[in-house]
Amino acid sequence: MIEPAVAVNNLTKIFPIPFRRTKLVAVRDLSLEVAPGQVYGLLGPNGSGKSTTLKIILGLVSPTAGRTKIFGRDSREVGSREAVGFLPENPYFYKYLTGAETLRFYGKLCGLGGRELKTRTAEMLQLVGLQDARDRRLGGYSKGMLQRIGLAQALIQEPKLVVLDEPTAGVDPAGSREIRDLILDLKGRGITVLLSSHLLAQVQEICDRVGILAHGILVREGKVQDLLSIENQTELILEDATPETLAQIAALLDKSQTRLIGQRHPQTTLERLFLEATARLPEKE
Amino acid sequence: MIRSALVLFFLALFGVLRLPIESRLSEQHRSAYFHQAQLELGLREQVGQLGFLAALSGFRSLVADVAFIQAHVAWERTEWGRVFLLFREATTLQPRSVMFWDMAAWHMAWNASVAAMNDSSQPNEYLRRKAQKEYFALGRDFLERGIKNNPDRPELYESLGRLYKDKLGDHAAAARCYERAAALPGAPEYDKRFAAYELSFAPGHEQEAYTALRQLYDLGEHERLPTLLSRLKYLEAALNIPLHERISPSEK
Amino acid sequence: MSRSGHRPFSLSRIGALSGNTFTELVRLRVFYFLLIFALLLIGNSLFMARLSFQQEFQVLKDVSLGAMSIFTSILAIVATAQLLPRDVEDRTIYTILAKPVPRYEYLIGKLGGVLLLLAFSVLAMTALFFAVLFLREHMLIAATMRETTGMRPEQIQEAVERLKASAFNAGLVPGIVIIFLKASLLAALTLFISTFATSNIFTVVVMVFIYFIGHLQSTAREYWLQEHGGGVLVKIFVAFVALIFPDLQLFNLVDDIVAGTAIPMALFAKTAVLGIVYTSVYIFFAWVSFHGKEL
């Protein structure tokens, strides 16, 4: 039995509202598991309890009931975060530090030092494409750059689990694409990724499994493919089909139980169109 | 809610634990002459709002300095009432400054008193003398309070001695002051001599004065200053000291 | 990459947090303005009105030490008050606590950065203060030598000795150390208040309040212990002040040091230890308060 990367068991979190009798149930009896090496998406609208769940997993908030574990260690232990990297939503970092200084700071917090720290810092800056801005203060970074330095600090100690809270929120399509590519790259290296998002279309391509939260309750959970496939429908995509061929197919289908529901030209997505169109313009950063 | 109550409780517990330690430390501070300025409501009346606030914030020394400088300006304008009030403020806020007490007494007993005596706007001589005496008393009061706050410093005893000698004409009291000064560490060597001189001027203390002066004389050459010699000779005559015990007549 | 296992207390982590806090604070423009102001004040006393040399040195010392005292107190409160709220608002705190950093190390690191800042400021101001004092002392000695050319050597020596005694007294350095410890006490207390305060302003206002009451605490304590008259309500109020508030009066020694009062080593040591105890207790309280705080 392989230890799951993240295990959430009957997690409940209730926030008392000051000066009022009622309480806010943010998460209600949630259970899920993330296997090592997976990309797991925690989806749901704003206020569904995604962020709270992530914070509990990271030990930033304590559960009212239930437990969460990272690689078998309870989240309330500080040591459980040895091999974890976290990128919060819309992060700000210390404005007066440069990019390199920021990474060195987080590296030291993880116990890195000396030459190893120097090497890792350079590697991470390279990975997120910020080598040119390494000596510029974070106060002068754009939002996309802040997001990237955030990713770099999350990865500074080569974690086995990376937790991303809304990684593509507010990022332009090109940046989004880069982040998604990075996530796939991490997966390729065997790193587990747990992310939360409410931008469903963007996330669809990269997650292996998803859990959908609504009002703190897990309403759907499973492999993306399984959840999304409309069981009783099949899609055929034909190239250079003549009207005669199409008529033959239609006649064939008439004789069987299968019903032809629709027939049209498949469409590219607006995102692909945008990326193709803007790719030809010179990159400015 | 519970957390706040717990926090307050633990703060109070900490307070209880440190209470005896701080009480004792405060006491030790006061024995070493710190924190002499008493923070009480009376202070507020004496030093005004700014002074009180400064005392509360721990900058009373600075405010005392300002009061002192203002007193200097008031003196130049011969506003004696203001001089008195400002010096009272300065000495209340900074009771460990010997200079403040000394200057306060000087302004009262030497300057204001003379101004009162020569006050051309007051034709009645009796009233002028009365005012002069009041200023002497104010000066003496400053010095006495200064001594209470600084019992380890000879300067104020010396000034009080001078005041008794020059202004109040009480040589016996002056002598006592110089004696006290001489007994303190750091006192200049002339304090002993001055004590003896003053005794020699005080009627009824001739024998005592003679003993003191003779003791000093016997200490050696450095004590045989002209004044000492002349007073010693005067006392020898007044007390009819036998000739063989007298100092050599050739000494002048 | 596996490391040797999580160390529960790491000086290097705390060092990273302190250094980071210090760097962040030092690069704030506000800090520079405040420091320059304090330095100007001290340097300006070089030109203050001259009455007599004793008076001049007294004023110079009072202004410099007063500037040091007020500057470090303000800095301690203002710099510390915004540390936690800013980290929470910017969500930076999540990135730090998501690393294997225990909460108490986070707090100690933050306070450490402020203490570094205070130490740096005190050193800078002391250096300037001593330089000014030294300069004036030398100028006045030169003037004295000129004025006493006809007098006996012992008299000249005595005059110079008296001048030097007015300038530097032995109690100055212990007095400055106590100023630093008072500021660190205030910083630790501010950190504690900020763990449950609702805003930056709230923390600063509460601390200003505590600062003033803290100077009256000894009076309240004596009143309570000596059982003067007064109703039950007064007694409760006075007891409350005596127990809850720190005794800041114990740390105001420079006023008397400047007037020439010497400070015995034993007394200095006890007061210094008390300052350290206060700082430690307050940061402990800060940890207790912050430990279970929902972020």
Image (tube, helix red, strand yellow):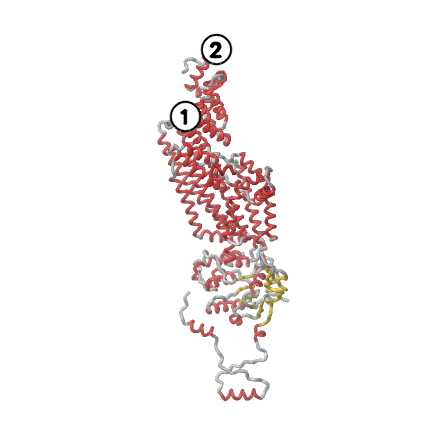
Q: Are marks 1 and 2 in contact (CB under 8 Å)?
A: no
- Mark number, residue B128: 1
Name the element at disc 1. Answer: helix
Whole-percent x and y of residue A79? 59, 58
Callout 2: chain? B
Report whether residue C113 is seen.
no
Callout 1: chain? B
The earlier-in-sequence mark between 1 and 2 is: 1
Report whether residue A234 is seen.
yes
Q: Is residue B181 above or below residue C82?
A: above
Q: Is residue A273 above or below residue B23?
A: below
- Mark number, residue B98: none
Give the amino acid at mark 1: Arg
Q: Is residue A38 above or below residue B144?
A: below
Q: Are marks 1 and 2 on the same chain?
A: yes
- Mark number, residue B242: 2
- Residue C77 versus residue A128: which sits nearer the camera? C77
Q: CA distance from mark 1 to mark 2?
A: 49 Å
Whole-percent x and y of residue C19? 49, 52
Whole-percent x and y of residue A38? 57, 68
Q: Residue furthest front?
A: B124
Give the amino acid at mark 2: Pro
